[in-house]
Image (spheres, grey):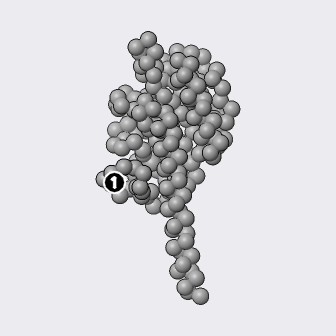
């Protein structure tokens, strides 16, 4: 149990340091077996991931019953619905990382680039805007999660993995490819701008 809680703290602080989350945004969770029961360790509501301590991490069961003190993230149902539906997922990271979220607020999609393994689809999957923290978002996101990442339109990024470290590096990778694509769009538009002179 201590390892699970420590991993949530480590990943939370890392995401903040890498500027993938800011303010009180973003949430992180992992699933572990606690006396053979599925238990979820998740970041608390209304606290910056910058300063999360082991004491702040909240444990809940798959039905959302809080097993420790504290109030879990407002997106706890989003995390739980994915764990219930996808048995192979044991780590979830939700960010509002700036470049990927910029795409989420635009009419452009993020292309799948090298690093995602076999490219079966040209773009990352996305779902339309649904109010954050709502049961509807939890339900639609779990149903729509086909790969390991989902772009939430006008909201942010949901990255998952077989463990929390994989989910964290995926969130970081998604931000990096969004940044690369943004830069290439800008450079390409500069080109036509310069030619017009
Ligand atoms: Zn969010």
Residue 81, image x, y percentages = 40, 30
The residue under label 1 is 119
Name the foreground residue: 155 vs 192: 192
Name the foreground residue: 135 vs 171: 171
Which quadrant is the C terminus positioned in?
A: bottom right
Query: Can you name the residue that lies furthest to the bottom here?
Result: 197
Name above or below for residue 178 compared with residue 1. Answer: below
Name above or below for residue 189 compared with residue 36. Answer: below
The structure residue drawn at horizontal position 34% and vertical position 43%, both measured from the top left corner, is 146
Residue 170, image x, y percentages = 47, 44
For residue 93, side relative to residue 50 (left or right):
left
Residue 186, image x, y percentages = 55, 69
**Residue 150 in view:** yes
For residue 131, side relative to residue 21 (left or right):
left
Name the foreground residue: 126 vs 8: 8
Query: Can you name the residue that lies furthest to the right here?
Result: 51
- Some atom of ligand 1 lies within 8 Å of the CB belonging to the residue at label 1: no
The structure residue drawn at horizontal position 49% and vertical position 33%, both measured from the top left corner, is 164
């Amino acid at each position: 149990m201590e390892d699970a809680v420590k991993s949530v703290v480590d990943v939370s602080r890392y995401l903040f340091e890498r500027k993938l989350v800011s303010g009180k945004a973003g949430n992180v969770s992992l699933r572990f077996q606690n006396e053979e029961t599925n238990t979820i360790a998740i970041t608390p509501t209304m606290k910056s991931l910058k300063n999360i301590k082991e004491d702040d991490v909240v444990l809940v069961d798959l039905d959302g019953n809080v097993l420790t003190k504290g109030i879990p993230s407002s997106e706890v149902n989003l995390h739980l619905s994915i764990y219930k539906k996808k048995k192979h997922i044991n780590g979830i990271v939700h960010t509002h990382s700036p470049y990927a979220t910029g795409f989420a607020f635009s009419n452009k999609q993020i292309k799948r680039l090298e690093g995602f393994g076999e490219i079966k689809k040209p773009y990352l999957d996305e779902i339309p805007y649904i109010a954050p923290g709502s049961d509807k978002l939890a339900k639609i996101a779990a149903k729509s999660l086909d790969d390991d990442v989902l772009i939430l339109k006008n909201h942010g990024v949901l990255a998952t993995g077989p463990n929390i470290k994989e989910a964290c590096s995926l969130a970081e990778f998604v931000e990096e490819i969004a940044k690369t694509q943004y830069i290439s769009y800008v450079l390409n538009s500069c080109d036509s701008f310069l030619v017009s002179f």
